[in-house]
Image (cartoon, helix red, strand yellow):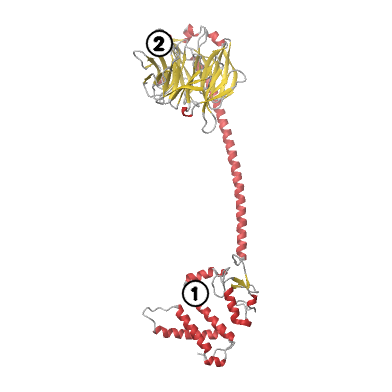
Amino acid sequence: MPDSIPRDTDIMHVHYEVEDDDNGGDEEEDDEETDDGEETVEEHAGEEIDYVTEIVQSPRASQTGPSESAQARVSFWVEEEVDKRRRTEGGEATSSQNECNNDFTCSICMEPWTNYGDHHICCLPCGHLYGMYCINRWLRQHKNAGKCPQCNRKCSTKDVRKLFAPRIAAADGESQKRIQSLEATCASLEKKDADWSKKEVEWKKRETDLQLKVRELTERTNYLEHLLEDSQRKPVLANLDCTFHGKSVSEHNFGLRFSGQVASCSFILKKELLVDGARLIDVDASNQVVLVARRQSGFGGTHVLTKISLMSPYEREDIRIPFCTNAVRDLHISPAGRNLVLFSSLGKKLAILSMESNHIILDYDLPDAAWSCSWDQNSSHYIYAGLKNGSLVMFDMRQTVGPLKTLQGLTNNPIHTIHSLSSYSTLSNDVKSVLSASAYGVCQWNFDAVGEGPFLVPETNQGVCTSLAYCLGRDEIVASYRPKVGMSNEIVYSQPSPSPSHTAGHGVVGCHVAFKKEDNLQQFSKLGSAYAYVDAIRLPKSTIIDLQDCNSLFVSADAVMGDLILQELPSFRSIQHLKVHKHPVRDVKYSCGLDRGLLSCLSDDTLHLFCTKGL
């Protein structure tokens, strides 16, 4: 142990002296440890401070006269040494934290500075940063010999300046350059991504256009192929023998008797009207009005009935029907000329609407969705509805409570067509006879008779019945069929199949079969049949035109070509092809008024009006 501490000598000498005594003190205290064998940093620190104070203040040291600067430096060193010990004893976690926060801590106490209070961040003229309390204490201890602890530049407490900033961090030049480089790279990548996104949109648009062109070319190719097939099958169809009462039509004079007169009767296109969402039509010839059941365009479009005048400028008027009515499935204007419309809907409703007030005057609730409806041809008070479950319901308009009678069908197939037979075709005036058509076939119902039915008309279950046309004046009917799934043409029909026999588009090879009701007999006899392309999915409508002093004409759509074909009955000889530019054909109606016949055809969203010449 030295006798005195030198005046302005190296502090490290004192440091070594203290460390030696500290170690010696530790050895002595090791012998006096408690049973726990633990010592605290504070105990060592207290001993160090006391020991150094004894050295500085000992009489021997006083004789030598240590300088105030040496005392201050020794005292400050002791405090720093204690802080260092505390930090060391605090473990690696504290050391790592101090290293991470080195840019934000005071270099004297190694504690973070603040922007308020005693440890407020401040700086010296040299630019080094400290906590206010630490640097003031340092400079006061050194008095006139104050220096910056880092660069030893002379300064005093008057040179200390507070810094006011929310946060101060040392800027790393390399990191800043790296950040700027990364930001530039990100900006470049974002620009490239935007360019690629723009190109992707253009490519998708171009792809959509190309797909549309391919679809158009495909449709045109299919159309040309069907046209070629139709031209090839016409000679085959012309050579087919259509039977009439078991004889060939070519051998029966009935089919040729008025052939010249029928051929002279032709239709020409009068007008085409665009009707969005149209599904059904009926014509009021006396009032020159066409009534269209349609659904308005747009999501959740409502169902309406649209009246279109047949006189120029073809004015229109929409009649809104209740929302609960849902889609209209069948529509008929009263034949009694009372400006009433009967319609059935999928909303389990059968309703009667007045075309004068445009309001529903009577409606009935049904047990199931109504697929078809009809007025009674002999009494204006009775109406009929064919249901989805195959039942036929009869109503009397004078009784608004409910149905007058309900008859169950032979099957549960929906009844898609109903026709009321004329009075001279019934058993008596009190019996009301009705023809119905479902996929199963054609049935006859006799209300108020001993045997009400239904009775299946013979030879009418030759496939899936898709439509039924009825001629009131002649009691002729024509049923259209398509083959059942898995049933070949040879099984369904007795005649050889036309070529080609495969499905073309939405059309398949089916047939039309004509029947006539026998006088004073409740049965139908087969007149003839013919092959045709019928719709493979939908249930299109057909009609029969009753011409005076001529054979009647059957009007139906060719499912492949899309044309409206007029054929003479019962030979099914093709009389005229009417071009319609939209597919598919949904409904066909014929009416006669003002000394001219009007054939109305609804194909997709276009209403075609054809008028006759030569009648």
Residue type, label 2: Thr
From the viewer's perspective, is residue 80 above or below residue 282?
A: below
Instruction: Answer yes or no: is residue 476 visible.
Output: yes
Residue 477 is marked as none
Label 1–label 2 contact, CB within 8 A? no
Q: Earlier in the sequence, mark 1 or mark 2?
A: 1
Mark 2 residue element: loop
Q: Position of residue 161 (x, y in %)?
A: 63, 72
**Number of other residues with Cα within 10 Å of mark 2, as a class: few under 14, some 14 to 19, many 20 or more:** some
Residue shown at the point (60%, 58%) measured from the top left = 182
Q: Is residue 480 visible?
A: no
Image quadrant where residue 312 sits: top right
Residue drawn at x 58%, y 78% is 137
Query: In the picture, residue 172 is in which quadrant?
Result: bottom right
Q: Give the image location of residue 119, x and y in percent.
A: 56, 72
In this orientation, which residue lies closer to the viewer: 525 or 150? Answer: 150
User: Disc 2 designates what residue?
Assistant: 426
Spot occupied by residue 576 in the image (x, y as percentages of width and height) = 55, 15
Q: Quadrant of residue 131?
A: bottom right
**Residue 226 coordinates in the image, percent (x, y):** 53, 24
- The kind of residue on which mark 1 rests is Arg
The C terminus, quarter of image: top right
Q: Residues within 10 Å of mark 1 (few under 14, many from 20)?
A: some
In this view of the protein, which residue sits in the foreground, 89 or 224? 89
User: Which residue position holds label 1?
Assistant: 87
What is the distance, in whole Å, between disc 1 and disc 2 at their CAs? 117 Å
